[in-house]
Image (cartoon, rainbow, N blue to C red):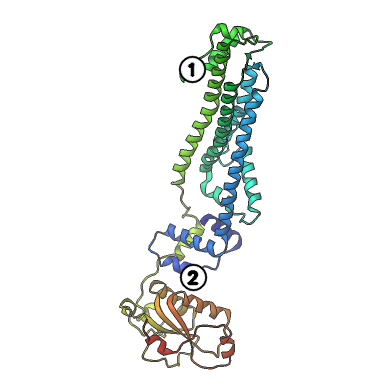
Amino acid sequence: MTQTIHLIETESGRFADQDINRQVRAEQISITDRIVMRATILSKQNGLYFSQKILIQSVKLSFVLLLLLSVFLGSSLALGALSQNPINLYWALFSLLGVHLITLIIWLGSFFFFTNFGGSLLIHCWLWLAKKLSQKKTVQQLIPAFVELFGSRIRWLIGFVLNLFWTVILSCALLVLVVLFSTKHYSFEWQTTLLSSDTIVRLTHYLGYLPSLFGFDIPKDEIIKLSENALNTGEIRSSWAVWLLGVFIVYGLMLRFLCMVFCGVNWLISCRQIQLNISHSDYQALANQLQPLLIVNIEDADKLGNSNYQWNFSMNSIEDGKGAFLVAVDVQESWHYPKSVSFLGFLNTREQRSKILDYLQLRPAKKLLIAIDTDRTPDRGVLNFINQLINKSQQTRIWFINQGKQYHNWQLHSLPLAQSDWLSEDI
């Protein structure tokens, strides 16, 4: 999500983030965590978080649909290989393992030579289906942000997903093979025009060597030679069925399963190594704006760089549990505020408003009374600032200090009103 925000801001400019940045700066966390926290808050305010949830749900749903498709493909693979009786051994073996081995070679080539590209039709089908299911209610930068953030590491995820699909396909095919071999009589034969029977014997031994290490016996040489024509002897049928299952498991299912586990483990490891590229100029500029807020004694006007700015309260007033304050927004500084209240100051300039928001972000008020001169127009900027002040205190009231020219317009906004004595009431 942080990378998505970065791509959007690169294309369309910065979000309105002043108050969000202030919230982030108040947290005592690392600069990377601040950038992530800012992106999280922005995404929730601008609907990006919801878009991400829709996309993730679509990805999950399409993943399940493709798994169901894999089950169907696996079953069809086994049924197609055993569609004839007697079974041509090597043709059946090619039917079971041919597409698997071809796609495995393609994936390995893309894995080593095209690290940012999946090289798999299933992966492209998955992403296409996810976009269709999301019904365009998502943000187009989400997937590019994911690819850009993970870079070449994404090949581990692609490898895991691709080999998972093939593991499911081959597992279902194996299950159907076992069921069919257990419930029907099949005869086996091999047929060739160019090869001799001795070549077939050697080929059978070569293919059966690894499976034999796992307990799948190789048919005897006499049985192999006699099987040029289909025989119905039970021992021969059983011997060929075991050999066929062994070759299929070792060169098909086991190979894909090991690839899946290898890619999955590397994906989990690489995920923990992912970091934002903080050295990027955009993130450097953002890091400078997200430096921690400092607890400033705002009694000391000189430290605020504004010698005319009045701050008339003690820092300890919040810490000792009082926390009831008065501020004046767009009020002439000649106005005489009640001496019985803790008055933070006049908030008439951008700098003054920024200072008080920074302070209240660190020290939220328990009660905050906002004095308003109703001769001033209740424009959007003032109302937004008042809303920000409301978010920085537990209780907030508005005090109209007069009935000026804009008094009626101020009343239309249904603001919670109070007088100065509200501050002295029990909190």
Q: What numbered label is drawn on residue 212?
A: 1
> Which part of the image, by quadrant, shows the C terminus?
bottom left
Q: Nearer the viewer, residue 87 or 395?
A: 87
Q: Amino acid at mark 2?
A: Asp
How far apart in space, not on screen, are marks 2 and 1 (Cα)?
Answer: 69 Å
Residue drawn at point x = 54 percent, y = 15 percent: 206
Outermost front residue: 183
Indicate left or right for 425 with 37 as reference: left
Q: Residue 349's x, y, as percent?
A: 49, 81
How busy is the neighbourhood of tag 1: few (under 14 within 10 Å), some, or many (20 plus)?
Answer: some
Which residue has dot 2 on it? Answer: 19
Classify residue 324 as left or right of residue 196.
Answer: left
Q: Quadrant of residue 121?
A: top right
Residue at image coords 36%, 84%: 426
* Label 2 or label 1, whichever comes before in sequence order: 2
Q: Residue 14: tell me if it is visible.
A: no
